[in-house]
């Protein structure tokens, strides 16, 4: 009998958890498992706002994949997926082609610009190690440029489009970074402006109003100016045009206005909603029992409110565990497990020593929440890399 081939696309939260669980579950020669990822490292997306602002190092937000998987059990291929061909059960990579019996798609999300003119060309996104290094260096460069051309105060105006969790966490870090940069470049702090612009009638739409209020107070005190109920309509090299036809001049626009699934899923001919595939209760694509989709590429409806679960690392990890179980069961002809989301809560950082969150039904804020955020980050390092990884990358303060 031929050994079944499992190919996992993407070594993000969903992909890594699937690979790690498979290497534990499968017996020798039960399946050939291949993990494909663009880079030879896994990035800890949930902390990318920190290196983006420059309050932390990009190295703390990435881990070599060779440290996370057992390469005797899982083949790692560093390559970029360019096409998924479900009819021929093949995946085309920049370096060659892989055929599969079972496919796991964990390619993560992409920036959603909703067709707003100029955002693709002129705005930065917090999406990968490469993108956040670029943002960090660009921000610092604006200070250096301003010192040479002090008439250009727009060099010191930073616009963050979207006050979802990514936007809020980023402005929290940026407002911590600005005083350091002002000191280093001898810039008067009152010249620096940070705008967080949100289209909805509130920041963090859908989140607890009392905690949203708290977050806005903390961030406003740190120098962030909120423009709520104000949609960005266009972005140019000179700044952003917002609802009401106000133009905000800025040399730095960071778009955190939303994400969608991976374009490769649309191109493969699957039915998607903004690039995300509505999977069945076993995480498979309806009509394709051998293709599983996880994380930001997948869409699952919360039966409690009939709305899609938000795309988070938390759900991607839980899906990875169930996906590995279901792959093993599929190979062995066993019973598949239904995915059931266990919401452990949400905690968002507002910069050093400040955060907001809900754990179960308990609201937390301030230092207690910031501490909880660190505990969650460390727990993740422990899950994927044990004590060794916690000691290398984990930071409680
Ligand atoms: P990802 O983790 O995005 O991984 C996708 C992988 O696929 C990457 O390794 C990428 O390099 C690879 N890849 C992509 N395209 C290709 C290709 N063509 N070929 C090969 N490889 C490819 N969620 C939470 O639950 N809690 C948080 O605190 C939290 N904080 C966040 C903070 C920030 C700043 C951001 C941006 C997001 C945060 N999220 C958080 C959301 C969370 O990060 C995502 O939901 C999660 O990363 C999705 O995991 P995933 O497995 O779907 O994909
Ligand atoms: P999001 O979609 O949650 O938020 C985007 C925000 O941008 C929304 O509030 C939206 O109203 C706003 N927006 C959209 N168009 C706009 C426009 N034209 N002008 C101004 N504002 C506009 O995206 P996100 O914040 O990147 O989060 C993505 C996912 O990652 C979510 O599921 C989130 O829960 C998760 N996440 C979680 C954490 C955490 O738990 N700490 C942190 C970051 C992200």
Image (cartoon, helix red, strand yellow):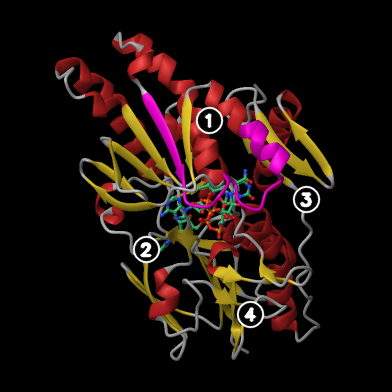
Q: Quadrant of residue 38?
A: bottom left
* Few, some or many residues within 10 Å of mark 3 (<14, 14–19, 20+): few
First in sequence, mark 4 or 2: give its number. 2
Q: Residue furthest front?
A: 244
In front of the other: label 4 or label 3?
3
Separation of residues labelled 4 and 1 (CA atoms) = 38 Å
Which disc number belongs to residue 83?
A: none
According to the picture, the residue beneath numbered tag 4 turns out to be: 284
Separation of residues labelled 3 and 2 (CA atoms) = 33 Å
Q: Is residue 210 magenta?
A: yes
The range drawn in magenta is 193-215
In front of the other: label 3 or label 2?
3
In front of the other: label 3 or label 1?
1
Contact, mark 4 vs mark 1 (Cβ under 8 Å):
no
According to the picture, the residue beneath numbered tag 3 turns out to be: 344
Which disc number belongs to residue 80?
A: 2
């Amino acid at each position: 009998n031929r050994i079944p081939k499992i190919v996992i696309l993407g070594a993000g939260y969903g992909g890594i958890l699937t690979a790690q669980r498979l290497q534990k579950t499968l017996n020798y020669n039960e399946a050939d498992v291949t993990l494909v990822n663009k880079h030879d490292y896994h990035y800890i997306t949930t902390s990318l706002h920190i290196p983006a602002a420059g309050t932390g190092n990009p190295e703390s937000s990435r881990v070599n994949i060779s440290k996370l998987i057992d390469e005797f059990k899982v083949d790692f291929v560093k390559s970029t997926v360019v096409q998924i061909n479900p009819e021929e059960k093949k995946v085309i990579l920049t370096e060659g082609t892989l055929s599969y019996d079972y496919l796991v798609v964990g390619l993560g999300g992409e920036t959603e610009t909703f067709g707003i003119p100029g955002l693709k060309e002129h705005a930065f996104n917090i999406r990968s190690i490469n993108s956040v290094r670029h943002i960090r260096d660009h921000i610092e460069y604006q200070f250096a440029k301003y010192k040479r051309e002090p008439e250009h105060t727009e060099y010191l105006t930073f616009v963050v489009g979207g006050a979802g969790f990514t936007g809020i966490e980023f402005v929290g870090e940026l407002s911590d970074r600005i005083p350091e940069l002002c000191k280093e470049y001898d810039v008067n702090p009152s010249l620096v402006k940070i705008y967080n612009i949100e289209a909805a009638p509130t920041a963090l739409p859908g989140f607890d109003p009392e905690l949203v209020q708290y977050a806005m107070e903390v961030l406003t005190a740190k120098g962030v100016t909120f423009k709520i109920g104000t949609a960005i309509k266009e972005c140019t090299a000179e700044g952003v045009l917002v609802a009401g036809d106000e133009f905000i001049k800025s040399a730095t626009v960071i778009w955190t206005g939303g994400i969608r699934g991976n374009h490769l899923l649309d191109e493969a001919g699957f039915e998607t909603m903004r690039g995300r595939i509505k999977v069945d209760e076993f995480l498979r694509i309806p009509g394709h029992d051998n293709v599983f989709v996880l994380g930001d590429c997948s869409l699952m409806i919360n039966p409690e409110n009939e709305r899609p679960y938000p795309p988070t690392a938390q759900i991607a990890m839980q899906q990875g565990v169930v996906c590995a179980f279901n792959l093993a069961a599929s190979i062995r002809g066993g019973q598949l497990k239904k995915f059931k989301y266990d919401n452990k809560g949400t905690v968002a950082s507002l910069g050093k020593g400040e955060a907001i969150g809900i754990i179960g039904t308990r609201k937390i804020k301030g230092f207690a929440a910031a501490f909880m955020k660190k505990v969650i980050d460390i727990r993740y390092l422990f899950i994927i890399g044990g004590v060794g990884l916690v000691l290398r990358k984990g930071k409680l303060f």
